[in-house]
Image (tube, rainbow, N blue to C red):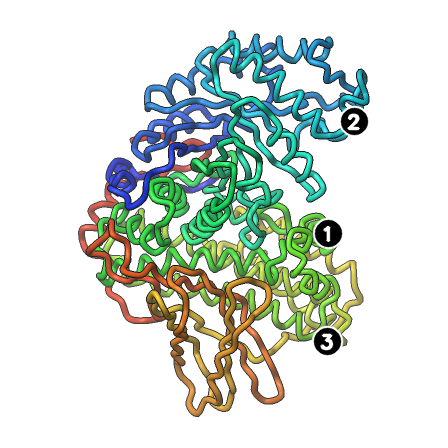
Amino acid sequence: MTCRLLSVASVALASLAGAAFAAEPLPFHGWTLTQDDMDYNLAVIGQVRDFGVTHVQLSHRIVTRVDQFQTEPEVVQRVRVLADAIHAQGGQAIVWMQELNTSDTYTYCFDLDGEDMQAKMQAYRDALTAAPEIDGVMISFGSAPTELAYIVPSCQPLAFAAVKEKYKAMIEAVSRVVMDEFGKQVYVRTFYHKGYEIPYLRSAIAETQRPIVAMSKSEPNDFEPYYPLNALMGDIGPHDQIFELDCAGEYWGRGAIPFVAAEYFAQRYREARARQTDAASPFIGSTCRVDRYEYSAMGTLNEANLFAQAQLVGDSDLDWQTILDRFIRSKFGVEAGTAPHRQLFDILRRTYWVGRKMYYAKGEWAFKKGSELPASNADALSLMFDKTISQWDVAYAPVTAQLLSPSRQVVLELLQEKFEAMDLAQRNLDALPELRTRMAAQVFASLETLLTKQRVATEIWFHMAGAVFGGRSLSPESSAWVSWHLDELERLADALDNGAYPQIVDPYPFPSSDLRAFVDNTRGGFSQSEAAEPTWLAITGIDVLNATDQSIEVQWDAKAGVNYHVQLTEQLPSYTQTRVVGAIVDDGPMRVTIDGLSARTPYWFRVQADGDGETMVSGDYTAWTRKAGGDAADPDETDSDAAPGGSGTMGLVTLLGLFWLGVLAVHGRSIRRG
């Protein structure tokens, strides 16, 4: 069961999404729904107009195969009802169709006049006849029951010897029915699993004569913020192209843990614009997954992601700081430049950093394909082999090698990274007490639950990472460290079972049973040692204080007698610049301004500490310089890039408390509009 907040002030929330933009709006603004709960879906669709959404995709548990229109009447009824609701909001309805849609097919005749293709075309004809409300069909090739690349042609084998020809034939067959006979639009989802699939997918779509629209995930394969931009963006021939984004956080807590990704989405839009310089494939917008089954972005802090997409579709050149500023003003009713605004801004932006540091290891997707804990070290290792970032960016190959057999230093650096996630999550919790009297008790409790869950999750992932990477290390100390981490995980499982966190009703994504299963599976994989807590030269309090169009100001908690450096880069994983800070005389906050930078550019930085014969480097942090002159659409905007951690800020004004009195707390699998 999930606990959510659902705003009844959707129009107020979206008012800024429809504001005047500095750039020409993109024509495609989509949402993707995956849940088959009709009450929930209708409630979400009821907000389509408020957010300016133009297209809604129905997928996963709603509909995924063309044969469902012949064999499952409930699917037909579901699609028709939802499509009507989408039309009532001024949008278009697109249905997903996996191809091939059968799991027992090994050979297939791709000849358009052959029996197989004629039957396929008739299936689409029947589907659109059964549900004429459908406006478009999304052919989804990746993760289909049977993927075309591996099917043996059963007729004219030479004509379909090239893999691309199978895809071209399927696109042609579907479009002859959907476009020519019914006048609907065909979309092609370019999802793929491995790099060797890119060339034939690129060729198949580029050579297709039909005016299809391509949809490509922002990353190659699955959503991962460290992955490079999808290689197919801007490179699929003379066809319009849209992004597929994830607002719900399938791999980042599914909304049960907040992951406000305005910065991440702005990064992808920036990269897409750069690719468009000499691209033949026009970029026309994006679609965002609103939910992952029963977990939805709606009614959680992740609703900021839906707002961010609306803003970027309206003006793809917006700074992420401006987007988050607008969300806070519209959602919470507080003005930029005020202490409440700054406090909310900091809380939301930190959730993105927390998710990156918690769920990834030096950029590697190293734990589980999902938001949950891996079952064991072997489970985590299998994900690394399958999802390693080095297959998409060879510069990460040394990082991958380090993580497969980490040295003592690498294990400690990974613990430092996870420790930073705990530090950030704790700073968010520390900011809450002053808000208690400024909002309704129910709203404060929901916010506290979200941030508490994130803080508990960071501690669990800290110990899980220590056990995983300590178990892979040949360092003599690692066995004792693993024992300590496993003991701590058992302690946390006991705390969850014994009601130490009474506000956490739904323990997803870390139920105590999963913690205990991981501990049991891991203890059996190495020799037991007396538990010992790892120690290192920890770096705390890292933050971005300010950003201009030419500089960034960063801060951390410095220690006397320690030498510090700030390393900077425009492209991970290598750091190309180092700013020497020198030895510190007294403990306390250290502020460093890094200038001479380019306007509106994302930089990455980390802090290095050297002292008492030890060296430690922090995890990575993002810092964007601002657009020169600011955003024309927000002439009164103040710079709200960041604030010092732990700075004294007053609570929310009474207006915020009154606003949140109109918010509904919704439990379970449905969101119902008030």
Q: Quadrant of residue 602?
A: bottom left
Please give the residue where the numbered disc 1 appears in the rendered image: 385
- Residue drawn at x 76%, y 76% as measured from the top left: 476
Residue 206, x across and y down, in percent: 60, 32
Q: CA distance from mark 3 to mark 1?
A: 26 Å
Label 1–label 2 contact, CB within 8 A: no
Residue toward you, 325 or 538: 325
User: Closer to the N terminus: mark 3 or mark 2?
Assistant: 2
Indicate which disc, 3 or 1, sits on the residue closer to the N terminus: 1
Q: Amino acid at mark 3?
A: Glu
Residue 186 at least partly seen: yes
Q: Nearer the viewer, residue 459 or 27?
A: 27
| Type of amino acid under label 2 | Ala
Which residue does the image show at 76% across and 23% down from the upper left?
A: 160
Left/right placement of residue 249 relative to residue 207 reads left
- Look at discs 1 and 2 and give the one toward the viewer: 2
What element does badge 1 sit on? Answer: helix
Q: CA distance from mark 1 to mark 2?
A: 30 Å
The correct choice, above or below, for 127 with respect to 473 in the image is above
Residue 645 visible: no
> At 39% across and 25% down in the image, what residue appears?
42
